[in-house]
Image (spheres, grey):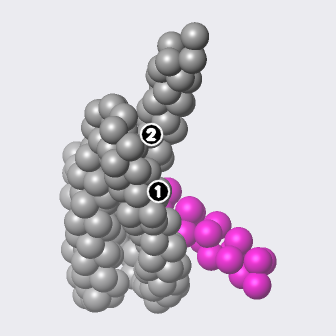
Amino acid sequence: MSKKILAVCLTLTILLSGVAIIRVAAETTPMTAGQIDQIRNNCVSTKNTLSQLHASDALLRVNRGQIFESMSTKLMDRFNSRVANNGYNNTGLISVSISYGSMLDTFRLDYKTYEEHLSAAINVDCWNQPAAFYDAIASARALRNVVHTDVVKLNQYVDQYQSAIIQFENDYQTVVKEVKP
């Protein structure tokens, strides 16, 4: 199973690298007959690879989405509520969790857009419309990079929330020491 996944990833990497090279050339000049033939010759295997990527990305999105959602609802929101209910200052925690929530919404929207473009790319007839197929893949790839950036930002907010918790803990310890002379 892992050899199959490795082979799929390697094929996709080679294909996307070739697509990137063709894209650079296509931006300055029209696609050549050789490039069009290359897309047509790899049409079926490319579509199969994209379908496998689509399925694996969907699973990753569900798993990541659940983790990100749990971070918000089960950790941040609950901890922020406890801190507020106990009368402590939680402005730093609230600020980070609000930013995290906004980024989570952005992640959801960006993933949906990516998924729609990838599905559209898979549905393009690569034999009869090789340039459109290429453009659809390039668009989906760019949107996949946007989703990746969203994931990186979400992870950064988790790190910021951890720092805000440490700051809260330090402030709390300072208040406790002042109360206990």
Name the residue located 48 percent from the left edge and 84 percent from the top edge: 55
Corner quadrant of residue 68: bottom left
Secondary element under disc 1, as helix, strand or loop, is helix
Structural crowding at the residue carrying mark 1, measured as other residues with C-alpha within 10 Å and reported as few (<14), some (14–19) or many (≥20): few
Range shown magenta: 1-22
Name the residue located 54 percent from the left edge and 69 percent from the top edge: 12
Question: Magenta residues: mostly which secondary structure?
Answer: helix
Q: Mark 1 points at which residue?
A: 75
Camera-side residue of 71 and 135: 71
**Numbered tag placed on residue 121 in the rendering:** none
Q: Is residue 110 above or below residue 5?
A: above
Q: Which amino acid does label 2 sit on?
A: Tyr
Q: Mark 1 or mark 2: which is in front?
A: 1
Q: Which amino acid does label 1 sit on?
A: Leu
Secondary element under disc 2, as helix, strand or loop, is helix
Name the residue located 38 percent from the left edge and 63 percent from the top edge: 73
Q: Mark 2 points at which residue?
A: 161
Place of residue 167 in the rendered image (x, y in percent of width and height, measured from the top left): 48, 26
For this view, does 23 lie left or right of residue 59? left
